[in-house]
Image: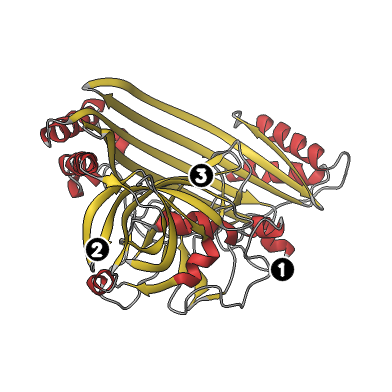
Amino acid sequence: MIDESVVAGTLSEALRTGGEFAEVFVEDRRSSSALLDDGKVEELTSGRTRGAGIRVVVGETTGFAHTSDLTEAGLAKAARAAAAAARGGGGGHQIVALDRVDAPSPNEVEVLPETVAKATKVDLLGRADEAARAAGSAISQVSARYADGRRRILVANSDGLLAGDDQVRTRFAVSCVAVGDTGMQTGFESVGRPIGFELFDEYEVDALARTAANRALTKLAAQPAPSGSMPVVIGPGGGGVLFHEACGHGLEADLVAKQASVFRNRVGEQVAHPEVTLIDDGTMAREWGAYAIDDEGRPAQRNVLIENGVLTDYMWDLLRARKEGRDSSGNGRRQSYQHLPMVRMTNTYLANGSEDPADIIGSTDRGVYVAHLGGGQVNTATGDFVFGMSEAYLIENGEIGSPIREGNLIGNGPEVLTGIEALGNDFAMGSPGTCGKDGQGVPVGDGTPTLRVASMTIGGTAA
């Protein structure tokens, strides 16, 4: 995207004016999306952004500047601005020799979405709308969204690193509203992969729409969720977001350093049931959070955070890792060239256990089965959380029974880790997601096998 000599010169300019470490991040992003709501195409957008973010570090101070001017002069101006923000003054001259780092892409893209006609993308929305409405007369509203993006990045720094990546992602989502005696109920389903338009050779939008519609229809016949503490069984893939939010964020090195993590100073301790292994894996092919390099040029890695219940490590970005005299774990991510990188998860999941999922449910006399969790809130310093249950059922006499609605799952991340008493062998990843942190959003994935927590609090509305 930029000549190597220009990148090297920009780094030298940043160091000349007082920097101890300098980094250039260049991004070229294309995107398109289409939204159909109530049978009408409400949005049809496409866009492209290009620019560079330049970071300069002096001691504990970081200066940052970004620009959409990718000329040599524009980059040099941004480099001087970033260096001035890090430390006024300076001097000397350093020449940076760049050494390219090649990291394999986790996926091969067969059909670039930018080569597909907009009419073809819109046609998918219409098919989804028809399939959802055909699921039942109670379906009153259907919303379908298509989105794709291609993000080419180049990262270079004063350590001599030069790396690049070409990231393609394609996503489709359907949301339905059903109306009945219990009022309005919603259902949602989505699929997303870091691949191209060939996604729709593997997934039928009609099937996705029927799944979303059936979830809404099922909740029309649901009873209010109970209240109180009871065993909770979480289905495969359905509860990954709980461990992402309630445990994963507390294992990010920046929150640990700020003393905003309940897992601070606990490496080497038993923090979970001995069968629990928690992994963050940016190399996980075809999963939403996968990439070849992170946004600091570090190749993606598979990082075991908790192994057999023992906390083994945190996730690291480049600067925090350098401060501790260690390597980055490949978790330095940023939303765009206009943002500084920070420690972020990729694909975070609980590894498979050994039990038959049917036995886990069958040995639960009374409890709640959560097929899918919704949004929630987490306090990373304490691990306390509240999540909505978007699809859940009662467990009665070892069998999944009536659907329930209007319920929350309330608990504490570390307590859930130690309270897991059964792990199934049916691991699955959940739906694609966007993780928000400090105003930045990045694509992430999460997953679990079927698991049972001995006791959690259900916040329901049943009398």
Q: Is residue 62 visible?
A: yes
Disc on the earlier residue, 2 or 1: 1
Tell me where residue 82 appears, x and y as whole percent: 74, 38
Instruction: Specify few, some or many for label 3: CA neighbours under 10 Å numbering under 14, 14-19, or 20 or more.
Output: many
Question: Left or right of 309: which side holds 138?
Answer: left
Q: Given contact means CB atoms under 8 Å apart, are the residues at marks 1 and 3 in contact?
A: no
Q: Residue at x 52, y 32 (%)?
A: 50
Which is closer to the viewer, label 3 or label 2? 2
Q: In the rendered image of this protein, does residue 127 appear above or below residue 91?
A: above
Image-quadrant location for residue 123:
top left
Disc on the earlier residue, 3 or 2: 3
**Identity of the amino acid at label 3?**
Ile
Q: Is residue 105 visible?
A: no
**Identity of the amino acid at label 2?**
Glu
Is the image coloured rainbow, by chain, by secondary structure, or in one colour? secondary structure
Residue 325 is tagged as 1
The local secondary structure at tag 1 comes to loop
- The residue labelled by disc 2 is 396
Disc on the earlier residue, 1 or 3: 3
